[in-house]
Image: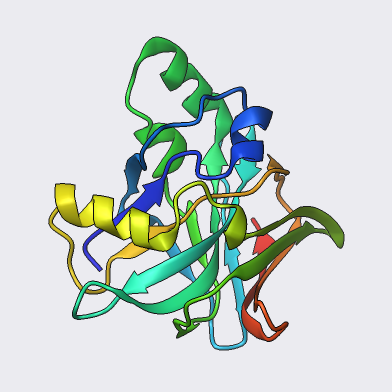
Amino acid sequence: MTAVWCVFRNYAAHAVEIGGDITPRPLFFLKSPSSVVQADADGLTEFSLPDHDDLIHHEVEMVVRLGEDLSPAEVCIGIDVTDRTRQTEAKGKGWPWTEGKSFRDSAVLGTWAEWEAGDHEMQLSVNGEVRQRGSSSQMLHDIDSLLATLTDWYALSPGDLVFTGTPEGVGALVAGDVVEATLHAADGRLVSWLESVVR
């Protein structure tokens, strides 16, 4: 992996909940590969929050990994862990978002499965309470559109990750929380999962 590409506001309801505009084409920001936390084969992992009192949010997302031909090869459930305090400050002042999006442990990944085209359903719960639920069918820009834009503008590499956007319901995380997230195929099959303790 050389890059972690993250699409900006790809679900209309999420754009509304954060008071943001919908963009006419896919726009992306980057996370550092060093921000990635990978679950084990059982989907278990843990991640640490930044050592300050900022508001930290979960954003559940479907994540694809690119193969040798730069098309989707694998898929997993993921969490874009966001420092909402730093991101909001950066947005207001026109600063880069790196502090809010690309800190240590800010890209949490579940188990990987072979990519299959079609709709996927995702869900995230915190301490047993469902916070987010959505479908890739709700994306404003589908996988093909995301990859077409990335290919046109950037130099992609095999193994690159693409976070495809989060549905509504983002919320706060605190140390001690147990986060569970799942990705199901349209036929109900469990494709990817993770269970993580927040440190």
Residue 195 against residue 172 in the figure, above or below:
below
Query: Quick check: 91 left or right of 157?
Result: right
Name the quadrant of the N terminus: bottom left
Name the quadrant of the C terminus: bottom right
Asked if residue 50 can be seen in this view, the reply is no
Give me the residue at 59% from left, 33% from top: 15
Query: Quick check: 125 left or right of 111?
Result: right
Where, by quadrant of the figure, is residue 191 drawn?
bottom right
Give me the residue at 47% from left, 77% from top: 117
Query: Quick check: 72 left or right of 115?
Result: left
Give me the residue at 58% from left, 47% from top: 49
- Which residue of the protein is positioned furthest toward the right in this rendering? 129
x, y percentage for residue 29? 34, 41
Give me the residue at 47% from left, 75% from top: 75
Q: Nearer the viewer, residue 74 or 30?
A: 74
- Which residue of the protein is positioned furthest toward the left in this rendering? 155
**What is the tally of numbered marks visible in this picture?**
0
Q: Nearer the viewer, residue 110 or 18?
A: 18
Asked if residue 41 can be seen in this view, the reply is yes
